[in-house]
Image (cartoon, rainbow, N blue to C red):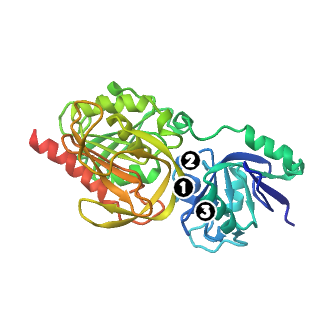
Amino acid sequence: MTEPAVLVLEDGRTSAGQAYGARGATIGEAVFATGMTGYQETLTDPSYHRQVVVMTAPHIGNTGVNAHDAESARIWVAGFVVRDPARRVSNWRSEGSLDDALGEGGVVGISGIDTRALVRHLRERGPMRVGVFSGTAQAASRDDLLAEVLAAPVMTGADLVADVTTRQSYVVPAVGERRLTVAVLDLGIKTATSRQLAQRGIEVHVLPATATTRDVLGVPSATGRSGPDGVFFSNGPGDPGATDGPVDVLRGVLDTGVPFFGICLGNQLLGRALGFGTYKLPYGHRGLNQPVLDRATGRVEITAHNHGFAVDAPLDGPVPAPVGGLGRVEVSHVALNDSVVEGLRLLDRPAFSVQYHPEAAAGPHDADHLFDRFVRLMTHREQAS
């Protein structure tokens, strides 16, 4: 027997459906993800903290869930919206159903609504706050539910990194021979990212987002140098314009000449460290099929995205970094759908970043070569010393 649920957007639009996952109430920023697969990786990606994810693919849950595909220790989305949930799980790797996993994680969801119409609405109006209500919570009047939604905080100005970062430093051992060490600032890192680094012979030292420049540069090198062989900034949630501490750390790293690689929020923070601003996108990029142009090679990569903010840097370049002493910078990658900045590269220092998810969990593997590029950057520095 199905139970009623209702979705209420901050502009007053409502959709009736059936309860899915946990029962109760949740409020967050409504965003849509375009992947036909990879829903478990989406749910467990810390970058989705405080967001209610609308899946554009109509049929969700048919492969169930399993421990291997989780990108963190918990589900991070604030809510989940699907059209047609699977009635049964059919996959040899499955260890449980998505519905049960959402319930156990306390994630309130809704099913049976026209997600295509909802996505078109968000495409026209932009991201907005949304509430999903089921059980006794949905019995309140629509005016009262709307008032709850309007009372919730917006994403702009939200510094959420402290909610998702590790509380204690830890080490992911290199696979095989230890060739290099990398200090990773955990802004909301995914398991697959550490795995990609470790598979390349890198000992990964994951540090909390509260780490100082001294903490980061105190990670020991595998090659006898002072400090780590490289520094990496991960993905993460929230408004990059409100995330100040890591920007100061990154400026200290850039001053030393230690190779740097950043992804997603790490890309936005590199932009800020260089002196560029950031801004909220009209509806963001989320999903597994976003085309990006590598301007150096002319190659188009299909990439996995999850970002609602972008770096405000000039597409014509290279240009001097607005912050003095850091040399020249250029926009290395551009989104083909809307010309949003998708990557930065310093020309006078060993540092680069991309806005998307090269670890490909879930997603295409077009961009995993970027981890090899990071290794070459660190190796070249060692050979030049």
**Which residue matches tag 2?**
73
**Which residue matches tag 1?**
70
Q: Quadrant of the C terminus?
A: top left
* Mark-to-mark CA distance, 3 and 1: 8 Å
The residue at the point 59 percent across, 73 percent down is 91
The residue at the point 80 percent across, 48 percent down is 24
Residue 122 falls left or right of residue 316: right
The residue at the point 22 percent across, 42 percent down is 350
The mark that comes first in sequence, 3 or 1, is 3
Quadrant in the picture for residue 253: top left
Question: What amino acid type should be assigned to the residue bearing mark 2?
Answer: Ala
Kindly give the residue lying farthest to the left in the view shown.
384
Q: Under tag 3, what secondary structure? A: loop
- Is residue 67 at least partly visible in the picture? no
Quadrant in the picture for residue 13: bottom right
Q: Quadrant of the N terminus?
A: bottom right
Q: Under tag 1, what secondary structure? A: loop
**Which residue matches tag 3?**
65
Give the camera-side residue of 115 and 60. Answer: 115
